[in-house]
Image (spheres, coloured by chain):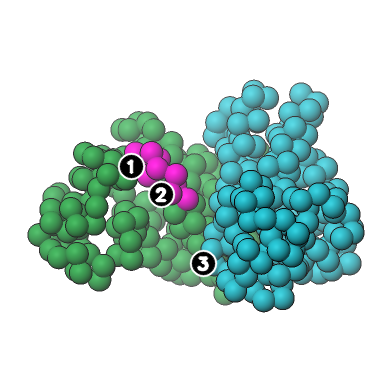
Chain colours: A green, B cyan
Amino acid sequence: MGRWKPDARGRLEQAALDLYGERGFEKTTVAEIAARAGVTERTYFRHFADKREVLFGGSGELRDMLTGAVADAPASTPPLEATADALETISAVFRGNLDRTRRRQAIINANPELREREVIKMAAFATALAETLRQRGVPDPAAALTAEAGIAIFKIAFERWIAAPGEKELPEFIRESLNELKAVTAAA
Amino acid sequence: MGRWKPDARGRLEQAALDLYGERGFEKTTVAEIAARAGVTERTYFRHFADKREVLFGGSGELRDMLTGAVADAPASTPPLEATADALETISAVFRGNLDRTRRRQAIINANPELREREVIKMAAFATALAETLRQRGVPDPAAALTAEAGIAIFKIAFERWIAAPGEKELPEFIRESLNELKAVTAAA
């Protein structure tokens, strides 16, 4: 189970990842996940609202880490710089977790419902980030644009990191994506 | 019915907009929409997969207009410039339609399911746009970042246009959002 704590929630996440990988998301039931994790279905639903949420269990913490890091940046740091720094900070969560992250992403990519859920999670990140930037005194539309740009940078860096295992670490891809966005906007 | 053609599809869209506005999205049934439009439920489902889709009927055409305009831009036009020009071109669809567009947006904003559907539609626009940019020879990650930036610009310009009726036209908000994104990235 690697880095995962052997609590019910962690065991459910691990069991879901294994079963979705072995049988596919569609063919796996909550009852099977609960059985593999050694808990009841009722316990499953205490932790996760449905069959999809078990794959997105850490996203609330990740969002709070991201907005927390932006809120804590020195007041003089420009908004997109503070955002990129915060994205690098939260990347630490994925360090050493490439294999697990790739397995999870392959499951998500194979299923339209899961891809939709991921899109919605990312949009919620952008909304939370824009709100944090407003609280730092960044006016709109700069706050909303910075948040959308930051999430786009993360999304694309993350895809590239997953696609090129071992080549570079995630923070390097984030910095590269930021630089590429700077080049693209400067040319327009 | 304003600009809307009195065909079954157009009548269904108009009836849904009216009923969702009067009674709320949740409390309206497909049977009621069909009855108001003077068609059968079967006809409704020939045009729209579910109760949500009737609000997003034009999105396929809008996506094709957007990618078509990017594909037709002179080869020398930088990718984000071609994208912003294309966004201004498709804005013509909304010209003179502010009232109807505001009513539709109020319905979407009031319902989490509809907001999710909209987020997913916008993500599909970004995916299609990135593919069009790749076909123009733009490499990744520039293609993906330009597409995400373009859709963010449109989304934020659209929100501002809806929130400030009559102040400026949508293309002006698009140009402003582009300039703001340039300022935000240049400062990072």
Percent across and percent down for residue B122 are: 62, 50
Residue wearing tag 2: A114
Question: Up-down: is B9 above or below B128?
Answer: below
Residue wearing tag 1: A107
Percent across and percent down for residue B80 are: 71, 39
User: Secondary structure under badge 1?
Assistant: helix
Q: Is residue A42 left or right of residue B47?
A: left
Q: Look at the image and give the residue range highlighted in magenta.
A: A105-116
Query: Between A181 and B173, which is closer to the camera in this rendering?
Result: B173
Residue wearing tag 3: A128
Q: Circle 3 marks a residue in which chain? A: A
Q: What separation in Å lies between label 2 and label 3 (alpha carbons)?
A: 21 Å
**Residues under numbered marks 2 and 1 in contact, where contact means CB atoms less than 8 Å apart:** yes
Residue B91 visible in the snapshot: no
Mark on residue B109?
none
Query: Residue shown at 48%/46% (left/top)?
Result: A155
Query: Between A9 and A42, which is closer to the camera in this rendering?
Result: A42
User: Secondary structure under badge 2?
Assistant: helix
